[in-house]
Structure formats: structure tokens, C-alpha cells
Image: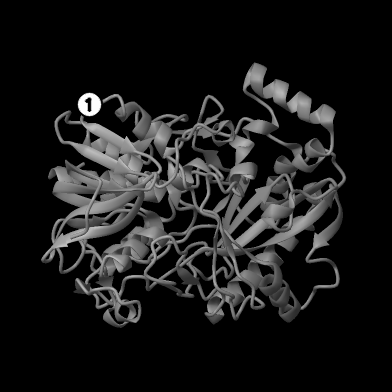
Amino acid sequence: MQNYTETIETDIVIVGAGSAGCTLAGRLSEDGHTQVTVLEAGGKDSNPWIHIPIGYGKTIVDARLNWRYETENGPEIANRPMYWPRGKVLGGSSSINGLLYIRGQAEDYDHWRQLGNAGWSYDDVLPYFRKAEDQENGENEFHGVGGPLAVTNLRERNPLCEAFIASAVEAGIPRNDDFNGAVQEGVGYYQTTTRNARRCSAAVAYLRPAMKRTNLRVITRAETQRIVFEGKRAVGVVFERTGKRTLIRARREVIISAGSINSPKLLLLSGVGPAAELARHGIELVHDLPGVGENLQDHYGALVTYKSRLAVTVNDIMMSRMKQLQAGLQYILARSGPLTISAAQVGAFAKSDPRLATPDIQFLFQTFSHDEYDDGLHPFSGFANAVCPVRPESRGTLRLRSANPADMPLMQPNYLSAETDRHVLVEAIKLSRKVAEKGAIAAQIIAEYAPGDQVRSDDEILAYARETGLSIAHQVGTCKMGQDPLAVVDSELRVHGLSGLRVIDASIMPTLISGNTNAPTIMIAEKAADMIRGQAA
């Protein structure tokens, strides 16, 4: 055992204060006597751009708040690396994401149950979505009120959004005012995780109220280096802060909620994972678990971008000091205007083939346009529709770069390696173009900026998607739940073959849900908290 500057004790230690970790901290400390300690590698969520909804445009590239991961070059995406923004701050990615509240389809969770995960069907998880939620539109069989997570309607209704919805309906996509209700299919406005036009991250919703409790301790700037085992039991973790190394012992449980990148990385650094991979880095084997870092999934999309006749885009605001001032005053004085918008304002869930039972395409319509995140917005009036297949079949891997905890892992998502993903993405771009040809939105388009009129055939569209596509930042699956040989945790999220250790975050999803992942990750943590406390919804 190494020498430590300090040794401290707690009942439960949670590694990571992201969407799951904040939720767990809030729920597990509710009894007032269970001692809970949360370790977060990032800092406090005090940056004002975190809390102003449109601030995601800054936080998504800010290295002070963001791990700024980069994958290995992708063979099917023109040998490019892919930028992965992930939150490194209290609230994790819920503090820097696009604020969209989407649960996925009921069939996603029923599929989890069919894979052998008892207790994870849609009927099982719906009570936890409702428990978490404070729904602006009121309570019904699908939605809850009074929960920590505020879910509200978009305040800013840009005329381009109205036009896009009308054209999508004309193109055959039904209107849907609640993607999280009886059915997901259709087009309409997204709801957002905001309250009073301010971001409602997991830190705001769960952690901040809980930090008033004497039995909860939150330590920021704490880089967890490894899990400590006694035999096959996890008894604590080692973390480093300001150059000092501390051992924190957990009397009851160690919970890893570091996300789909850092949770498998920490397991591997701690000797839990494929034996050959650990041997390659000289890491002492604690438990041979072949699935750690396998089953990596993400939504990969492409942008269909247009030059707008209406100068009402975010691009126009950023090109004018006067419009910036006006938008700022609107927000300060009335909590309204363009600073209140989410990353996409209108959404659609549609089918690439009418014979499908459920939608397999997501649209994220945004009243701004850009190429790479770091390049900023285009210097013209522009808007875009990001499109992606929602149930990708491509699977990737996460491996250690070295045994040094400071090194970024090797991430190979293998985007578009499955033929189905390539086909559905091409069909998604074609459907987006079909919508753009219809009356209301077509009247506002000067020209298609990208892919452009020269890109017409399926092969040309696919080449465009390979060369310019982007991650929608929904990485999951690297510590998947199940009973098969590559499963890492069981249906109560306990790590197979070990005791005192759970993984609770998006990495446990066996398959990627049909949409954005923040709300499902919070649901997972809500359900896990009841498992740990021996309760049921």
C-alpha cells in the first residue's frame, strides 16, 4: 500500500459529479445519516455561461469545463479523429450539454429487459422518469411534477422553427407536441432542462440543495487514480488533489459514476478488465472482466445547412454588436429572447422506411450554422438540421493509452462500420432535404450551403457524411449491464465478480437509446439510488 497524505472514511464514495453522480448524491444523502462523499475531477459550476442556456456554445469548447476528448482516426469517416465534449465540472455534461429533455422510446427499455436485465423495462423505468421530473405542462401518466429536474417549454419561437415544423408536416411527418409521451414519432418543439430561463443541470437540481446537509461532502479538483481492493472487495479509492494523494475508505460501497469514458478507464487502471489489456500496461490483475471498454456506442450525425433569407438566426446576432446588446438586455430584463434557446429548438423523430415499427432518425433543427465547433458560427444568416440514426449498430472500444491516470484513453468508436448506419444516415439527409423543399421553410432558403447542390447521389451523400459528420455526444455502453460474457454489471449495477462496487452512469446502457442521453442517465441514477436503499418506486 502506498503512503498517503491523508486517509478519510465515509459510508459511500461516488466518483464523478455528473448527471448520475449528482443524482445519487442527492438521493443517498436524503436520510441525513448516511455519510456520502463525492469526488469530482473538475471545479465548481460557477462559470456564468453554464447557467445561461445559449452558453453551451461556449462551454462545449471551454477546456476549463470540458475534457475535450479526441478519438482515434476513424477508418469509415475519412480517417478523421472525432471531438468529444464531456463535462469536467460539477454537473458533468449536464452543465455543458444542449439542454434537450428526451427519454427515448418505450421499446428501448423493453429491449434492455429482453436482453436479460430484469427490472429495466419501460414500465419499470417510467416511475423514475416521473419521479425526477418537474414538468411545466403538468402531471399525467407519462410526466411528473415536483421532482428536482425542471422540464420546460422553449420560450423563444423563431419564425424559422415554425416554418420547419409546417414543412415537415407537409412532408408527411406528423405533428407531435410531446416526444416523451405516448409516441415518439413526429415533429415539434423540444422541451429543455431549464427553470426560469436558467439551466437546470443535475448539479442545480440535485447536488446544490443536498450540499446543505452535514452528511454530504463534495470534493472538487479531485482526480481519482484507482479503486482500492481487499481481495475481491472494493474498499475505497485513491485521489489526488493539489499534488496530495488521499485514500478515502468506503464502509459500504464504492460507486463509479465517471461517465462512459472515465468509468471504464478507472476500472482498467484499477486492475479490472481484460487480462491481456492490463498485462500490456503492467497493471496487476484484480479481476478478469473482458467487457470493460467494449460495446462503445454513440450517435453520429451530419449537418444539412442553409443560407437564410430571414436575418433572424443566431449567426446574425453574433455578427452585430447592437443585436448582441439587445439579446443581452432581453435576457437580463425579461428572461426571454435568443439567449434562452437550447442547442436545437425543433426536433423530429422519423422513419427511414415506412415499414419500421418505430422511428430510427432524429432531427435537431437549430437556428444557427457552423462547421467545426472551434471555428465558431458562419458569417452569414444560416440555419441547419443535424440528422442522425438513433439506434446505431456500429460498436467501438475504449483502451488505455498507458498506466498513467493523466493520459487520455484510446477511443475508437468505429462510426459507420455497420452498413445499416450508413444507409439510415443517407436516408436521413434525403428526408431532411425533402422537408426543405416544402413551402414554408423553402421560402426562407437562399441556397443549400452543405452538402450543396453538387451532392446528389447516395454515394455522394455518404461521402459527405463520412468527411464532415460529427458526434452528437451520446457515448454509452462501455460498462454494459447484462449477463452475457461482455457484461460488466448486473441488473442492480454491481460489477460482476466483485463486491462493494457499482457502476452507475450512461456506460451501463447495453444499447443506446433512441435520443439524447441526459434524462435517461438521471433516471438510471434515480433507480439505482432506490436499489441501494432497498426501496422501490
What amino acid type should be assigned to the residue bearing mark 1?
Thr
Residue 486 in the image: above or below residue 106: below
Residue density around tag 1, few if under 14, some if 14–19, many if 20 or more, within 10 Å: few
Which residue is at a point 55% across and 81% down the rendered structure image? 419
Question: Regarding mark 1 in the picture, which secondary structure is present there?
Answer: loop
Q: Is residue 428 left or right of residue 315?
A: left
> According to the image, what is the colour scheme of the structure?
one colour
State the image coordinates of residue 403 (x, y, percent, origin top left): 37, 69
Q: Quadrant of the N terminus?
A: bottom left
Q: Is residue 430 left or right of residue 517?
A: right
Q: Is residue 336 left or right of residue 145?
A: right
Whether residue 150 is visible, yes or no, is yes
State the image coordinates of residue 284 (x, y, percent, origin top left): 23, 74
Which residue is at a point 19% across and 71% down the rendered structure image? 286
Residue 200 in the image: above or below residue 392: above
- How many tags in the picture? 1
Which residue is at a point 59% across and 75% down the rendered structure image? 73
Q: Is residue 163 left or right of residue 175?
A: right
Which residue is disc 1 drawn over? 214
Residue 384 versus residue 529: which sits nearer the camera?
529
Q: Quadrant of the C terminus?
A: top left
The image quarter in which residue 85 lies = bottom right
Residue 82 versus residue 485: which sits nearer the camera?
82
Which residue is at a point 28% across and 39% down the rendered structure image? 25
State the image coordinates of residue 194 (x, y, percent, origin top left): 51, 33
Whether residue 149 is visible, yes or no, is no
Residue 205 versus residue 47: which sits nearer the camera?
47
